[in-house]
Image (cartoon, rainbow, N blue to C red):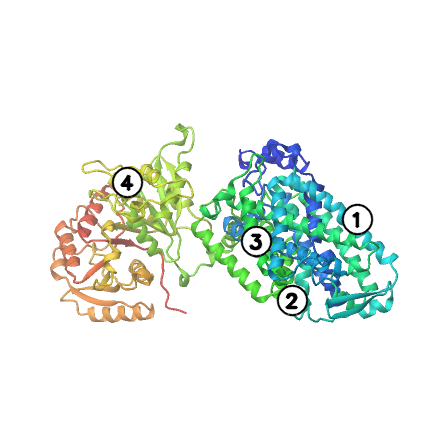
Amino acid sequence: MSTESSPLLSYRLFSVVDEGEMPGSRAQEEAPLVGGGATGTPHPDPAGRLSTFFGVVVPTVLSMFSIVVFMRVGFVVGHAGFLQSLLMLVVAYVIILLTVLSVCAICTNGAIQGGGAYFMISRTLGPEFGGSIGLMFYLANVCACGVYILGLVEAVLDVFGADGTDPPGARALPQGYFYSFLYGSVVLLLCLLVCLVGARIYARAAFLIFLVVNLVLLDIFVSFVAVGPRQVPVARDANHTVNASFTGFRLATLRANLPAMYSRDYTTNNVMTFATVFAVMFNGCTGIMAGSNMSGELRNASSSIPKGTIIAVVYTFVIYFLLFLMTSFTCERTLLKEDYGFFRSINLWPPLVLVGVYAASLSASMSSLIGASRILHALAKDDLFGIILAPAKIVSKGGNPWVAVLYTWALVQLVLFAGKLNTIAGIVTVFYLVAYAAVDLACLALEWASAPNFRPTFQLFSWHTCLLGIASCLLMMFLISPAGASGSLVLMLALLGSIHLRAPASSWGYISQALIFHQVRKYLLLLDVRKEHVKFWRPQMLLMVANPRSGAQLVRFVNDLKKGGLFVLGHVEIGELDTMPSDPVQAHYNFWLSLVDKLNVKAFVDLTLSPSVRQGTQHLLRITGLGGMKPNTLVLGFYDSCVPDDEFLRHPAFSQARERDPFGVDQPALQAHFPPVRGAGAPKALPPAEYVAIVSDAVKMHKNVCLARYFPRLDKERLFSGKAEGCFVDVWPLNLLRPDTPAYVDVCSLFLLQLACILTMVSSWRAARLRLFLCVESGDRGWVAKEEKLKELLGKLRIKAAIRAVAWDHVVALHGPRPAAGEPFLNPAAHRVTDEYLAAVNALVLQQGGQVAVRFLYLPRPPADTAAYERYLEQLEILTRDLGPTLLVHGLTPVTCTEL
């Protein structure tokens, strides 16, 4: 049951989770991340899952320490000095803290499944952002695992390598690029074996390592105080030894270590800068997601991740600060630059430092490997990358995604070819910063969307912290590596586009929809109908569709005609809600929206239930749209006795089945939903008088009206193919049913001309040429002036159209005597508009040469006498018979302006 279906249940779900109910309960299974989103997966054995300390604090602390706390403190302080080191530390932890605040907010808003940061981002920003950034975060963990293993190898070879600094007896391991790769592969194999066993054995091993690391740190702090000043020989090779000093706590040493003094790094032989040193230092602090990555293994992820992560961040910050401070007080810069493993040289019992280095590096490697495998497993389960990651869904009986672990192991093997820790530290840092910025973006989007179901119990955040977090991450990315930052963003955009094109729609909920709603509501309120001006008029169409099987071509035409305006497909279901158990209209929306997708038109759908089509159309004309976004033009298919064609059978959008439909409306379902077209001889459901009444109602409601005939015959592909000759859009601005009032510049005529001009402005119609017809009688000496007036008007309106004068004396002669003043139009007793006259007009229109794509004709107002409705419809039928695609237009609103 979703939270929308029961407000009481929604409250209970959140309250139970906030109180720390164990996962596996119904509450946590159903609590959504953001209202109605993805639900949590029930854990088969809640009691066997990890607690806050073992599942979050321990892996996060170990990941944030890793090799840096033992092997790169001297590197950072030696090159950057104490002041810049402190600045780097503060900047790094500000970025981290801002991201942690966002993580805490998202985590405390509902149940969290496996996948950590990927799960948070994808369920908030949607599959496109979630998949692309999730994959990049996965790669960051893969590279980080390689960094930690290379650091461990570096530490081992520094002691036991053939060129190591220890006495000759300890130099047993051969050194070189391929040897380093071999040692790294052995360490990685050990991590693989642990991770294949599962998260529980890793948690136990990690706790033991956690105790060892903290014991070593305690020993280091004691050694700073207990060990007296001494000279430390530093051998970079067999022929070169440098004496460096450990001075103990001396103010002079601190003064000497305050400024920066960047030089070459002896491991890579590259000159260091603030950015490169920060990249290495920050890489040691990027483990804040280690606990989040274990979200699928935690008893209560929503509670454990915020608490455990904050504790780990505060603890590691204090340790790093004390190490930087004590190192700056006691060690000369030469010692720091020439021996990154100097803790061993100044320790009470040097082997203990080695134990700490190896343990921390090994733990961080396992943490990154197991965390990355969980992210990959979550990506595979969501089917965002298809068959490539499909095997990563496989899990053992205990729930361990062992195939994802093997995938990750293989990629880390490739990373080990880099050879040196400092070589790939910058890449890892940039990838982590992208992921952190995405988490901040997810939280910012939730906050800005003001979704009612975004109610995190963690309140120490705001949109300011999210925005500052995004800005700081992006800034540091480009400071560390402009090329790497640009490349990572390009990679993210490429992945985003790829997932958008191929991934199915999800039921997670899209933050983009919430943001769009928020902004659209705001701008709709600003769209004041009282401020409308004719200069910015645009068509806003309501097309009534009885059966889309026979109206698909008209739907596409009106989509062209709207040109940036509102387009609504309206449909009336006949029935009384009082006699039905539920509203049948709601179940039909999905089919109509899928129809819109298949026709590739930009249209909304509005359906209604009414006792008659006329009443339903009145409802839609009144209530469709919001504020200034309401239809101003009603479009109807023409009422005639023609047997409609089933356009579903020949339209490519319906004849070519799609492999999958994101909303569950497949090809057969769509075909079956809409009823077959009316056969020959079958009666029409709508009486002719009611059809004309609908037109009359629209005119009374001050809506423009368009009646479309023969549009199933419109073949744009043939008309505008390269081999076809030019075609025309013909406009007849004269009221042909009342030629005694030859006004070419009234409101309706200008509306007619405006619609035709709009059509030719559409990119797919620009090859069509506009023709304007001027009907001329031989005795009319003023037709030249009329033509000049029309040309002048077209020039002012910036409309390119050819004016053609057409003699129609033989047509007017059939019209009958002129009406007396004040005599109503279409008086049946007068019999002035005869069938012969209408047939002659029809023939005149057909006689105009050239290939005509669409004809625009003047639609006269329906008669006031309802008894004349059927005669009115007969006249329109004769007038437009066999003309091809024709649009009869009656305009009521001014739509053109000659002023700037």
The answer to whether 40 is drawn above or below residue 700 in the figure is above
Q: Earlier in the sequence, mark 1 or mark 2?
A: 1
The answer to whether 118 is drawn above or below residue 283 in the figure is above
Horizontal and vertical percent for residue 817?
Answer: 14, 55
Q: Judging from the image, what secondary structure is the residue with disc 1 in?
A: helix
Q: Earlier in the sequence, mark 3 or mark 1?
A: 1
* Residue in front for this viewpoint, 373 or 641: 373
Q: Judging from the image, what secondary structure is the residue with disc 2 in?
A: loop
Discs 3/4, front: 3
Amino acid type, mark 4: Glu
As measured in the structure, the alpha-carbon distance from the residue carrying label 1 to the one carrying label 2 is: 31 Å
Whether label 1 touches label 4, CB < 8 Å: no
Quadrant, the C terminus: bottom left
The label number, if any, that marks residue 413 in the structure image: 3
Q: Earlier in the sequence, mark 3 or mark 2?
A: 2
Whether label 3 touches label 2, CB < 8 Å: no
As measured in the structure, the alpha-carbon distance from the residue carrying label 4 to the one carrying label 2 is: 86 Å
Discs 1/2, front: 2
Q: Which residue is mark 4?
A: 690
Quarter of the rendering containing residue 757: bottom left
Amino acid type, mark 1: Leu
Q: Judging from the image, what secondary structure is the residue with disc 3 in?
A: helix
Amino acid type, mark 2: Thr
Question: What residue do we see at 66% from left, 69% from top?
Answer: 269
As measured in the structure, the alpha-carbon distance from the residue carrying label 3 to the one carrying label 4 is: 76 Å
Q: Judging from the image, what secondary structure is the residue with disc 4 in?
A: helix
